[in-house]
Amino acid sequence: MERQAAGKKHLHVALAGNPNAGKTSLFNALTGAHHKVGNYPGVTVEKREGIRTYGDLTLHIVDLPGIYSLTAYSLDEVVTRDFVLEQKPDIVVDVLDSTNLERNLYLCLQFQELGIPVVGALNMSDEAESKGIHIDADILSKTLGIPLVKTVGTDGKGTESLLAAVKTASLSGSSGKMPAYGAEIEACLARLEKLLRADVEFSKRYPPRWMAVKLLENDQNAIQKLGQSPRGESIRDQAEADRLWIKKHFGKESEIVITEQRYGYIHGALAEAVRKTPVEKVSTTEKIDRILMNKYLGLPMFFLIIWGIFKLTFTVGAYPVAWLESGQAALSAWLEQIIPPGLLRSFMIDALIGGVGGVLSFIPLIVILFLCISILEDVGYMSRAAFLTDRFLHAFGLHGQSFMPLILGFGCSVPALMATRTLKSPKDRIATILAVPFMSCGAKLPVYVLLAGAFFPDRAADVVMGLYVGGVILSLISTIFLRKTVLKGETTPFVMELPPYRLPTARGILWHVGEKTWQYVKKAGTVILLASIVIWILTTFPVPSDGPHTDEYKLEYSIAGRIGKFIEPAIRPLGFNWKIGVALIPGFTAKELIVSTLGILYGNGGQGAAGAGVSADATGVSADAAGNTAGLSAALRADSSMTPLVALCMMVFVLVMPPCFASIATIKSEAGSKWALFEVVYTLCLAWIMAFLVKSIGGLFV
Amino acid sequence: MRLSDMDEGTGFSVVRVLIGGEVGKRLADMGFTEGANGLLVRGTFMHDPLQVRIRDYDVLIRRSEAHLIEVMPVGGNTEGFTNDTQEYGRKRQRHGFGAAGGWQKAFACRFGRKS
């Protein structure tokens, strides 16, 4: 991509800016529906690309991650600057929050230093006016040397003039005026620049001015890049000497001095261009925060909101779930009529409809959950939740932003794992990802209900509650352990912007929900379908040629039955017989399948087999499910090897064992295959240990 | 005086960030630089983390990070147009809710994470 903008039909535009500056809504306003979502190569930083035609120009717009600065400390920031340096887009459009220009321009300057043409979008200009901030775009534009356009991303105002500015700026190719750092530092910079320019190849790749500033900032990534130059060593030594000199001269670290100079430059520029009329009244945000962020009311309000979300999800969600399930039942019944009994029918009904249906019946719940999260996110409540919970979670090596994913884990792990994207530090994020599956998701509930109801009829609710609480405690202990071992290291600073409350737009919310739901359907749909076919094969083949023609015998004869018998020695110490071993196998696909498999094994086949994966939905507690499982409870109790203690061990095992395939697949895409594999091995070992502990300790009392 | 020792609802001016490296750089990037005016809006129950207004926007930082920022208390009007929180803080103190030297802060000093 050589920069020859003149006469060019295609323009590569990178959209950058601070978080909460309205970048996403401006991106949507620019590209409409024409965009695709992917990842930057090798990292799980989301990358959106869209196309916009403007006159005879085709603009390829890339949405860069929302960042505050261009240091080497966060993945998002490194991704952004590497993108600009390596992909060399024709122009960077920096989306600036007009209500907070000082901090937003701080990033803008750094893009200018990267030697790339920059256009500033003074976004949320309507909000700034109402706050009494009057910006003279012309004066500011002249001071900074870059074109500035006032925009309102939420309703697309100003996008046309922004595009016009982009076109003009791409022709000029100028990146505006560089901030001046004061005589002493400029002298250091000039010296370093001269050294850098001596290596023509290197200075073509990395703009010398930018490189010099980064070296004075003690930027490890830039220092590492110096290794590509044969003169790297001597330049590094010079920079080291300069940094020491600055520290001595100014009395503080050079990176701090550079930052202060930049802010000083911005302050000066804004003093001329921005006029503020004091607005006396207490802001609405402040009024709301006095309740929602209150020392005493904040947390109760937070839990009320969470409770409301779950209530909404499971009461409203129950209707469409029921419709989908009856639709599936009708489809199965119809297939039963037109397909003769045999392998094909079993495959169609048990594997295909059972597998896809399981995912399908989850969709209404997922949509409502995503809807609630998106609203909370867009309103600006998420950072408030982080504020309220950070003190507690930090003690266990988590982060305030871990709380939302953990809570969502009680609904379904997949959206919970996807919600960990808000965590910017990789270690915090992986710690959260590994903690989420210990929250008992909706699919584990039917298993608890069945076993607790059968073996602890008087105290079923206490047992189920105990399992939920136990899961939370285990996740915290596990996190401490992981933080001391595989996730060792300094925790990253908790420095988080608290944006004012903003009314979300319906378009933004729906767009967000649609995108997330589609991601879920794609992931869960393909993985679950594949997994349910595999499980179907395991539980069906080989087909016995003689012997009793019961489903129970067929299952015992199948590969799954043999696996159950094979692993029996391993699970014997937990008090599990081979039947439990067999029942746990489909638990790797989806936890609710454990109930239907137990149904087949304990000669209660009929409804269990046909409705595998359907009979127990996320709500699980419906009277229907309870009715189905009454016979199974009796059959389980009749088994002499199934004592209440063994049932408890089994519940503990189900609580801790590896999450469903859809979750594993999500962990793989969010954290990489290494962590997905780790999660499986870790939880499997931990499940065994925990069940064994329960068995041994419980054995002392029984 | 350190930012972590400030009372809720009081204004300050940044003297300097005491360290460099990731934490110091991050704090400076977010606007904690010499001479910047701010306001400690509120803390949680444990006085950790803290909500701080700096350069006309609000940021959440942990006590351990606030401890790395040397500040000078500033009375009266701090920069910006929302002084209501300061007024709110003074009102609270008058009514005996006492953010100043409150027991939560004492509690946090005693049991909170030190750094």
Image (spheres, coloured by chain):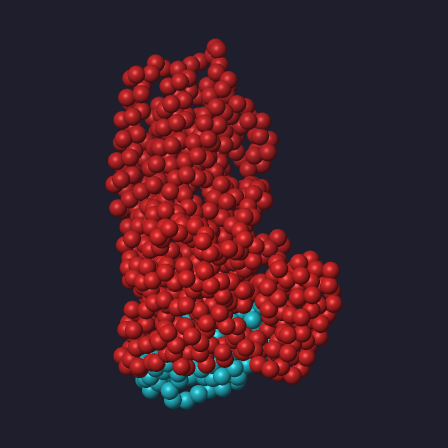
Chain colours: A red, B cyan
How many numbered marks does the figure carry? 0
**Which residue lies most toward the front here?**
A7
Of the pair A552 and A97, the residue shown nearer to us? A97
Of the pair A179 and A293, the residue shown nearer to us? A179
Of the pair A673 and A173, the residue shown nearer to us? A173
The percent position of residue A568, horizontal first and vertical second, equals 57, 30
Instruction: Identify which residue is drawn at 33% across, 64% down.
Output: A151
Q: Is residue A454 visible?
A: no
Instruction: Identify which residue is drawn at 30% across, 81% down.
Output: A277
The percent position of residue A637, horizontal first and vertical second, equals 42, 32
Above or below residue A94? Residue A680 is above
Q: Is residue B22 visible?
A: yes
**Which residue lies most toward the top here?**
A546
In this image, A573 relative to A162: left or right? Answer: right
Instruction: Identify which residue is drawn at 49% across, 66% down.
Output: A174
Instruction: Identify which residue is drawn at 51% across, 50% down.
Output: A40
The percent position of residue A107, horizontal first and vertical second, equals 48, 68
